[in-house]
Amino acid sequence: MDDPGADAAGGSATIAGKRVRDFAFDLSKPTVTDVTGKLGALGRRIDVTGRSAGAGLDETLSVEVYDDFPTMALVTAVFRNTGQRNILLDQVSVQEHR
């Protein structure tokens, strides 16, 4: 997450047949909270927000880790349209490995 390399973001969205990969995450301001899930009472949730300037789309990437499951991390992504027109997401990829 903090080493995007030449490929920029680790995920992408496809809008109207065009792949969007220009999400720029603000890693200087993560939100760290206690977990509220049903997998355990102890753990942390980290949220970072990214923005695609070209698509008018924001992404919030969340990682949850639980003390009861130390070898597992749950990753979720939420996309929000920040533009003035409707966007139809054809496909979303939360994780892409290199």
Image: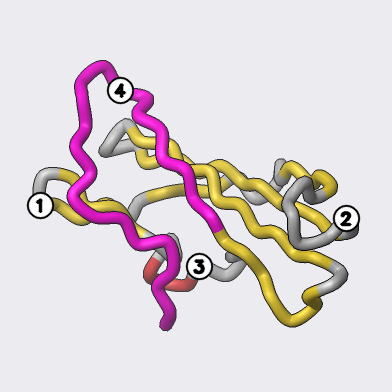
Quick one: label 3 or label 2, which is nearer the N terminus? 3
Q: Residue at x 74, y 55 (%)?
A: 38
Question: Residue 58 bears which disc, if any?
Answer: none
**Residue 33, x across and y down, in percent:** 81, 44
Q: Nearer the viewer, mark 1 or mark 3?
A: 1
> Where does the N terminus fall, quadrant-wise?
bottom right
Question: Residue 83 bears which disc, if any?
Answer: 4
The answer to whether mark 2 and mark 4 are in CB contact below 8 A is: no
The answer to whether mark 1 and mark 3 are in CB contact below 8 A is: no
Q: Secondary structure at mark 3?
A: loop
Q: Residue at x 81, y 55 (%)?
A: 44
Q: Residues within 10 Å of mark 4 (few under 14, many from 20)?
A: few
Q: Secondary structure at mark 4?
A: loop
Q: CA distance from mark 1 to mark 3?
A: 24 Å
Residue topped by disc 2: 41
Q: CA distance from mark 2 to mark 4?
A: 38 Å
Q: CA distance from mark 2 to mark 1?
A: 42 Å
Q: Residue at the far top: name it.
A: 84
Amino acid type, residue under disc 1 in the picture: Gly
Amino acid type, residue under disc 3 in the picture: Pro
Q: Is residue 94 magenta?
A: yes
Q: Secondary structure at mark 1?
A: loop
Residue topped by disc 1: 17
Extent of the magenta region:
76-98
The answer to whether mark 2 and mark 1 are in CB contact below 8 A is: no
Q: CA distance from mark 1 to mark 4?
A: 18 Å
Q: Residue at x 40, y 73 (%)?
A: 96
Residue topped by disc 3: 4
Q: Secondary structure at mark 2?
A: loop
Quick one: label 1 or label 4, which is nearer the N terminus? 1
